[in-house]
Structure formats: C-alpha cells, structure tokens
Image (cartoon, coloured by chain):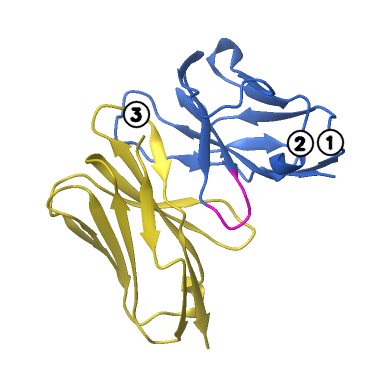
Chain colours: A blue, B yellow
Amino acid sequence: EAGVAQSPRYKIIEKRQSVAFWCNPISGHATLYWYQQILGQGPKLLIQFQNNGVVDDSQLPKDRFSAERLKGVDSTLKIQPAKLEDSAVYLCASSPPGLYNSPLHFGNGTRLTVT
Amino acid sequence: GQQVMQIPQYQHVQEGEDFTTYCNSSTTLSNIQWYKQRPGGHPVFLIQLVKSGEVKKQKRLTFQFGEAKKNSSLHITATQTTDVGTYFCAGRETSYDKVIFGPGTSLSVIP
C-alpha cells in the first residue's frame, strides 16, 4: 500500500511569513494526526482528526496555527505568522478506522526552518 | 495532563552489548506502542502492548508492559550497528485516543 504522503519536504521562510503543509493519508485511514518534532525531542501532538472532525487540538497554538481536513481525506496545516520557535519537522500520521489500538503510520515529514 | 518520560536520554554501547530503555507514564495507559526513528527518518512502528504484564519478543528485542500499565521497557540483546536510532514509547490514556510520545532514547552503537 502507498504510504502517507507529505509536501513540501523542506521549507525555509522568514519570521512573520505564512506557510502551509499538505498531507495525504493512507487510503481508508480515518484518523489523521499532525505532530511537531523539534530537534532532539519526541513528536508533540498538535491536532488529531477522526474523518473530518477534530478529536483533539489542545496543544495547537490556535492564534497562529490552523488545520483542516476537507472531505475526511487530505489535510493541510497552516502557520501564520511564523515564529523562530516554529522551526521543526512537521509529521503527519494516519491510522485505520475503528481500531482503538491501531499503530500510527508516519509520512516523511516537512522540515521547516524559520529565519 | 498526561506525561510520558523515558530514560536514559542517550546511550552509547559497544557493538554486541545489551541496551535497555525505560518508559514511564504519569497516568494509567490503555496500551503502549514503541517506535524507532533512524537519523533523518520518521518514526516507524515496532510493537504494541495491551495487557498488564505483557512481554513480547521480536528477534533480539524484548518489550515489557508493567503490571500497573504505567511503565514499559525495551531491551535489545547483543546490539548491532543497524540498531542505531531513537526509540520512542507512545501511550494512550485509558479514556482517550490521543497518542502521547515520550522524549525518546537515542542509541549509538560503536562498531
């Protein structure tokens, strides 16, 4: 099966600019996650979707970050305006539907550098 | 909120030596998953433990889930250079589907 697709692979922007990341999960996977991974740290959950509804976004900085999952498939994560501390790898993951204990399948991530 | 901790943060071993990383949660978990991330790569699922006291083996890797379902460990016997990477535990709370990752243990293997 095809894996989780993410683009772009790398992005360099200046602070206060905006940026968007795209994720296409594995076909049929109902749950989609966005994680932020700062260098040397574990992935931090930003938002979790079940189909096109938000399950958890408690750690999403809503003053600058937004995410949507239209039609319950693809998802976009946007940052506006970016700050230096947003430099990180943004990982998208998906998991199959209806399986409470299902593993996460990660994409290759988008490495964001904010200068 | 739920916190997942791991020790040690780094471990350097000679090839052939054993390695263990420990994971502790501040709350009881419904299950725990282990992932491996190679340098420059993304986390890859290794295994999931669900039952209290469960032990699972994958070749040289042994995974344990504590009796209280709040801690877990990963033990690698006779490390190889292919074991290099960061090992993360990730837990789900009993009542939630949110998956919280630990900070990881970075393993270096000296040939």
Cα separation, mark 2 vs mark 3, equals 30 Å
Frontmost residue, B27 versus A49 = B27
Disc 1, SS:
loop
Identify residue for label 1: A15
Disc 3 and disc 1: Cα gap in Å?
A: 34 Å
- The residue wearing badge 2 is A83
> On the same chain: label 2 and label 3?
no
Question: Residue under mark 1: which chain is it in?
Answer: A
Residue that appears at 25% across and 41% down: B27
Magenta segment range?
Answer: A37-41
Q: Quadrant of the N terminus of chain B?
A: top left
Asked if residue B22 is positioned above or below residue A16 in the image, the reply reads: below
Q: Residue at x 57, y 51 (%)?
A: B42
Position of A104 with respect to A15 (left or right) is: left
Q: Which residue type carries mark 1?
A: Lys
Q: Amino acid at mark 3?
A: Asp
Q: Is residue A51 visible?
A: no
- Kindly identify which numbered label has been placed on residue B97: 3
Image quarter for residue A50? top left
* Disc nearest the viewer among 2 and 3: 2
The percent position of residue B78, horizontal first and vertical second, equals: 35, 82
Q: Measuring 62% from the left and 22% from the top, which residue is drawn there?
A: A75
- Asked if one can make out residue B96 in the rendered structure from this viewpoint, the answer is yes
Query: Residue B49 has which mark?
Result: none
